[in-house]
Image: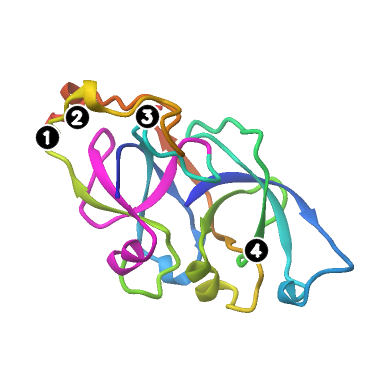
């Protein structure tokens, strides 16, 4: 699972029929993870009524499909939770280049995310 | 899934049996605010998208199995054609 912020919404009338009715949100992952083929964003289905500005937990792969309405839904990312609070020690977080996929320092503006 | 722009169509007269004559599109992933990246992916089209369309591309073998069939040798599949998107905090 990854942590990210909902930054927008996507509308698509023509879509795979098994995605009918799914709410699609644009999520910007926080730091430690970059989608392999993307432009620093993910499009994820939403089952927990997240909104723009929320910090969310996004699950990738098989569990995302299970959450998005059954194992035969063709999605690879789903929002599984809205984060109320994160405690972490910034000094202990990995630095960019410390490992595969770590391209930016991990940073999260808790004041903006903690509006609930 | 990620959003991207279909920038072209790809034909190959000699291709692996696994591609089975499927329609292949060149997709350039975009940032959330709609700026093109320098990356380029070849995606199987399950929805009759065309050049110029902004699309949603899903990745993975299971997604591929569910949409275009397990025999297809490509793990990037177009699952949606974007009508509009709104990003407020890019």
Q: Indicate the chain on which mark 4 is placed.
A: B
Question: Which SS class for mark 4?
Answer: strand
Residue A111 locus on image (x, y percent): 16, 22
Residue that carries the numbered disc 2 in the rendered image = A113
Residue at x 26%, y 33% (from the top left corner): A53
Residue B12 locus on image (x, y percent): 85, 63
Q: Indicate the chain on which mark 3 is placed.
A: B
Q: Which mark is residue A85?
A: 1
Residue that carries the numbered disc 4 in the rendered image = B45
Residue that carries the numbered disc 3 in the rendered image = B88
**Distance of mark 1 from mark 3, alpha carbons?**
22 Å
Residue B46 locus on image (x, y percent): 61, 67
Which quarter shows the C terminus of chain B? top left
Q: Is residue A104 left or right of residue B19?
A: left
Residue at x 46%, y 39% (from the top left corner): A100
Q: Residues within 10 Å of mark 3 (few under 14, many from 20)?
A: few
**Distance of mark 4 from mark 1, alpha carbons?**
40 Å
How many marks the image carries: the answer is 4
Q: Nearer the viewer, mark 1 or mark 3?
A: 1
**Distance of mark 4 from mark 3, alpha carbons?**
29 Å
Q: Indicate the chain on which mark 2 is placed.
A: A
Q: Nearer the viewer, residue A55 or B88?
A: A55
């Amino acid at each position: 699972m990854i942590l990210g912020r909902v930054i927008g919404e996507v509308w698509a009338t023509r879509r795979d029929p098994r995605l009918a009715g799914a709410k699609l949100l644009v999520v910007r992952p926080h730091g430690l993870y970059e989608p392999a083929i993307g432009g620093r964003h993910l499009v994820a289905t939403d089952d927990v009524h997240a909104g723009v500005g929320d910090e969310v937990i996004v699950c990738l792969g098989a569990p995302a499909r299970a959450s998005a309405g059954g194992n035969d839904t063709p999605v690879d990312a789903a929002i599984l939770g809205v984060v109320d609070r994160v405690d972490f020690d910034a000094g202990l977080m990995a630095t960019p280049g410390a490992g595969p996929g770590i391209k930016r320092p991990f940073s999260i503006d808790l004041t903006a995310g903690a509006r609930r | 899934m990620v959003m991207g722009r279909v920038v072209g169509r790809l034909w190959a007269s000699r291709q692996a049996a696994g591609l089975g004559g499927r329609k292949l599109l060149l997709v350039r992933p975009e940032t959330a605010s709609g700026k093109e990246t320098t990356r380029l992916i070849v995606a199987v089209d399950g929805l009759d998208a065309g050049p110029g369309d902004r699309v949603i591309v899903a990745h993975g073998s299971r997604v591929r199995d569910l949409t275009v069939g397990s025999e297809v040798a490509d793990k990037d599949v177009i699952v949606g054609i974007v009508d509009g998107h709104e990003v407020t905090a890019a």
